[in-house]
Every structure is written in structure tokens, then in C-alpha cells.
Amino acid sequence: MDGQGGRSWDVIVAGAGNAAFCAAFAAREGGARVLLVEKAPRAWLGGNSYFTAGAIRTTYASLDDLRPLLEERLTDEEAAGIALPPYSPAQFLADMVRLTEGECDRELAGILARDAADAVRWLHGKGLRFRLLFDRQSFAVGGKRRFFGNLTLGTVGGGQGLIAQELAAAERLGIAIRCESPVVGLLRAEGGAVRGVVVRRPDGQTEEIAAGAVVLAAGGFEANAAMRAAHLGPDWARAKVRGTPHNTGEVLRLALAAGAQPHGQWSGAHAIQWDANAPDTGDRGLTNLLSRQSYPLGIVVNARAERFLDEGADFRNYTYAKYGAAILAQPGGIAHQLFDATTAPLLRQDEYTAPGITRVEASTIRGLATGLGLDPAALEGTVRAFNAAIRPGAFNPAIKDGKRTAGLTPPKSNWAVPLDTPPFLGFPVTCGITFTFGGVRVDAAARVLDRAGRPLPGLHAAGELVGGLFHHNYPGGSGLTSGAVFGRRAGRAAAAFAQGG
């Protein structure tokens, strides 16, 4: 539905991705009249959330905690065939601290970990449908489906399903949505409180829309090449954008101009291995299928046919968001993932067999090199050295199996199996940026803080705009969880402020 002029609003939410919808749901629960204003046309609703796989990191004591959330109910017999280690809030927080090298905002990270399960149940109550990520996060080992990496749950239909379900919930709750209305200013009351927004209409004219409070959930600056170059480094201007082209940082800059305190790693970003021939910004049809996330099962080489990272350093969930940057630093910003017939059946079939992806197959390593445009002798030497360095041990993709190389730099720390069985497969990849880590500082209620650490009255934030959570790296599925957790808190606080609370 579209927001109608002439109405009054308690809460305006800038953005229309998962964090924005969660803020709107919570504000509506608080009795607020809510309007979402979105920069993109309606066909591009959903922000970056639309382009995700729908994976959402949550905590649980056992599979029994998740079973009530699942669209397809598990029988007891089916449940007995699933191996799912528990994942507690303490483990989630420990992952945040470990992966961010201790630099995450401990208060915000603690809230994220503690609130995750309740936020997911809350979304389920809003009509969101969930499934177990069998295809993305488990392997059949020892007669059971064994989940790895503590990422188990996702929305039915992936990111597209997530946004469709959140749109349906917004319709049921009476939340208005106005598209093609980028926020270009914030309205301030005499005392400085934020009391609405200025938007640019499709006809080019600006319009003031008053409200009791505002939630900013309009993404980071990942789709702005100039800002990427300025904050992340000059090479980042050439990174491909995984998601929406509309997250270009204007709303973040408005918050800073209003006095918001910058927070987090402004020189960091979530960036992954992405199809080298993908378009410069997200493809609404293929969405997440342009990612290449089975690299722990093979090796990755650069344009000189050299390995340059430890493919098996940890589960994919805990390395993928930093390896895009590693590839961007290679010659030409290009690399190649290599597999053979032994590991090919274990690849994520949706990502590695989807129509339109870049794939090379050959019966020899030399032929694979030729197809990928690599020096054949150099690639043969790299593969030969890798195969010779593999130590004995049992291969088990569902655990960190310790099957490693010795004497190689960099090593492969787990899942080291030889590339020696044709046909050989090669997938050219580049850096696909997902979102930027720098944002504004918020408190536990998701109120935006000024440079003195005081709340800016009437201004709240959620999603990628929240700085301080992620540094250097990222636990897979945490972005949607953060959007839900802090979107919910922002919407509640905004509704209370708008109503004089």
C-alpha cells in the first residue's frame, strides 16, 4: 500500500528492508501510526534483505526449540535423524567477540545474542515462516544430517520470501508504505527533537512529513563507489555490489549532520566471494545464487595460479564475510575456486549449478587452467604441491576435521582433500560487498546518540546504520538477526517517544 498525503504519523521509518519492517511492526504494536518511506521504486522493495539467503542466526538448547517455528513439521523419526549441537547466547556472544577480534561493542553484541531467539519467535508470530537450512548448512555423515557453523534457521523462500512475508504482515497491521521517496532531510523541533523527514517526490519536489519520531533503517554506503573508496580504500571502488543499488549512504550522512556519533569500523565491510561476471549491482532474479560459498571443500587461487588464503581456517559461516576483501587485494581483484569430482557432489547445488553462473569444466588441470585463463604450468605446480602436502586423516565436512596440509603457506587447516579426480571444476570469483560496518552509535533502546553520548530526541536507528557490532569479520546470519533485534527495539522506543513516553 502507499502512504497517503494529509495523514498524520506517529513514527516514520526510513527504509523498507528487514530492519525497517521490524521497526514498523514494533512501533505499530506500541499503538503508533506508522509510515515507511523508501527511496527505491516498489519493484525494488526489500533493500539488501531481499538478496539474502534468508539465514538468520538464533540460539537454541536443542532442535526442540526450533521445531515449533518450522513450516514443515518434523516427525519424531525425522528429528532423530538430525544432529544439531546446542547454541547458547553465551556462544553467540563469544563468536561475536572472537570474529571481531574483541572490537565489537560488547553491550550491543550482548543484546544481539540475548535477544536473538525471542526476536525470531516474535517474527514467527507476525507470520514469518521458517525452515531448517538442510541444503546450506548440513552434510549427511554417519547416517544423520549434521548441521555445522551454528547457523540452522532460515526463512521459507530465502530473502525474497522474507520480504514477501514482511510485506504481507505490514498490510495486515495497517502500516503504510511510500516508495520513490528518498529522505533528504530531517525535521527538527525548536528544542532539537527530530519530528519528521523531508522526502523528494518522484516529480523532483521536496515534501515535509511530520511525525512524533523517526527510525533510520536505510542501509549503509556499500552501493556508493566514492564513499567506499574514501572509507574502505581505493580498490573498493571496483567491488561488485551484491544487493540493492539504493544503499548509497545519504541517510547515514543526514544522521551525522544532525549530530549523531559515528561508531564502528568505517574502514570495514561484509564482502564475500561473488561470481566474477555478475552485474555491478544485485540481480533480482538470481539474488544470492551468485555467491560461491563451498570454497572450504576446494582450493582458491589468484590470477597467478597461487593460493593466498586458508580455505579451511574455520566453517564457512566464520570466514566468508572477510574473504571478499582478500580477493579484492589480489591481482585484478579476481580469484578462482577449484574442485574435482570428489568434492563436486558436496557443493551447494543452487549456487554452483544455477543458470547464468560462470563455470569451467575440464578433464585435466592443464585444461582447467586454459579455460580459466591461467598459466597451465603454474596451476599444475600449485595443485601438485597442495596434493603432496595433505596429511593423513579422515575427511568430515560437518566438523572441523583437522585434515590439513603441512609445509604450505598459507596452510589449509581443515578439509584438505586432493584435487586429483576429473572432471575438474573452476569458478571465477571476485569481491561482492554486502554492507558496510561503519554507522552511528545507538544505546540499548536503539536511540541514536550524539557525540557526547546523549540520545538525540526522536531519532532511532536499526540495521546497517547501527555501528559497532561488526569489525573485520562477521558470524553468518547475524545481519538479519541484528535487523530484527534492533529494529524491534527502535520501533518500541520510537512509539513511546512519539506518544510522550
Image (cartoon, rainbow, N blue to C red):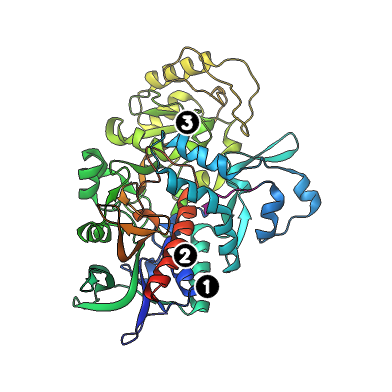
**The quarter of the displayed image where residue 229 is located:** top left
- Quick one: 377 or 320, which is closer to the camera? 320
**Residue under numbered circle 3:** 338
Quadrant in which the C terminus appears = bottom left
CA gap between label 2 and label 1 equals: 10 Å
Quadrant in which the N terminus appears = bottom left
Q: Nearer the observer, disc 3 or disc 1?
A: 1
Of label 2 and label 1, which has the lower sequence position? Answer: 2
Rendering coords of residue 472 (x, y %) = 37, 37
Q: Are marks 3 and 1 in contact (CB under 8 Å)?
A: no
Rendering coords of residue 349 (x, y %) = 56, 45
- Numbered mark located on residue 169 in the image: 1
Range of the magenta residues?
A: 55-60
Quick one: SS at disc 3? strand
**Residue under numbered circle 2:** 22
- The amino acid marked with disc number 2 is Cys
Of label 3 and label 1, which has the lower sequence position? Answer: 1
Of label 2 and label 3, which has the lower sequence position? Answer: 2
Label 1 CA crowd tier, 10 Å (few <14, some 14–19, many 20+): some
- Quick one: 193 or 388, which is closer to the camera? 193
